[in-house]
Image (spheres, rainbow, N blue to C red):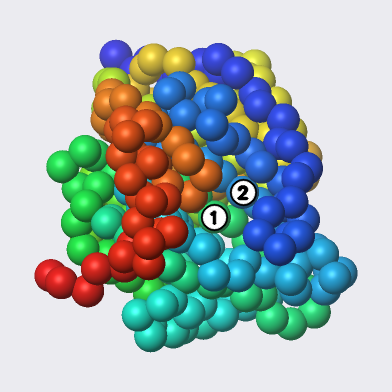
Amino acid sequence: MTMIRSVTRVLSSMETSDGAGVRLRRAFGRDEAKELDPFLLLDHFGSNAPSEFRPGFPLHPHRGIETVTYILAGEIHHRDSSGNTGVVNVGDVQWMTAGRGVMHEEMPQGKILNGFQLWVNLPRAMKMMAPRYNNILANDIGIARPSEGCEVKVIAGKFGGVEGPMRDLTIQVELFDVHMGPGAAFEHKVKAGINCFAYVYEGRPTFGPDPGRVGLDEHTVLFGEGDTIVAKAGRGAARFLFASGRPLREPIAWGGPVVMNTDAEVEQAFKEIDQGIFIREED
């Protein structure tokens, strides 16, 4: 018997700035980390005023997490202290596993920017793994069309017979970009015990059993127990990110761009940064 997941909460995103002054909307973060485990943070950056994003994210560290950058408009130039460089263009995804440590910069270019960065926690056993990058081009992201007016870009996981190109996962998560035309519907099976959310970035879709609960633009929808996610568009089109993952249920010690299991581990990371030994090139 199908049990549609009801909406438990709808979170309003918060306008803030990060990096060297990039204006963005924080969909969720530290306060919701336990509730959305294994997801830690979601930022939505979007502007057609270059002064609001061109300062970028100068050289900064990460340890203990993965960052998933998905670009809808514009481009971000990436460089790290080990000499790795790249450009994340429209429709591309960069899935970076920081592991034991990455020191990098992300600098937007162009006259417009719209996109997301999602932080995924790493389990204790993988927090000190070797860093790695998975650079996914827009053309490699398959699109499922489960019903009239509904398109699902499958970045990670499987949907409608389409498997996402991000297959080298440290933990099993799903990440979809869902587009619904007026009156279209989206339905997806999820396993028990899996946490999931939908971040609405266009329109006013409803979620859950009829009559459903409206997910407003730039809001995050959280779900209760059940085995099916249902979303419906109204008179207008709607777009949202959907993500799911099994919770790690491990302690979270958060120090800005470093997320470990204990405060001592976070302190050790910043001590290594101060001493210039944070980046380790060994395998």
Q: In the image, residue 61 lies at what x, y percent?
A: 45, 60
Query: Does residue 229 appear anywhere in the picture?
Result: no
In terms of secondary structure, where does tag 1 sit?
strand
In this orientation, which residue lies closer to the viewer: 26 or 280?
280
Q: In the image, residue 282 lies at what x, y percent?
A: 15, 72
Residue linked to disc 2? 43
- Taking the spot 25% from the left edge, 47% from the top edge, the residue there is 127
Mark 2 crowd level (few <14, some 14–19, many ≥20, 10 Å Cα): many
State left or right for residue 98 relative to residue 34.
left
> Residue 239, relative to residue 195: is it above or below?
below
In this orientation, which residue lies closer to the viewer: 186 or 128?
128
Q: The residue under label 1 is which amino acid type?
A: Gln
Q: Are marks 2 and 1 in contact (CB under 8 Å)?
A: yes
Q: CA distance from mark 2 to mark 1?
A: 5 Å
Residue linked to disc 1? 117
Q: In the image, residue 114 lies at what x, y percent?
A: 69, 64
Image quarter of residue 55:
bottom right
- Taking the spot 78% from the left edge, 42% from the top edge, the residue there is 15
In terms of secondary structure, where does tag 2 sit?
strand
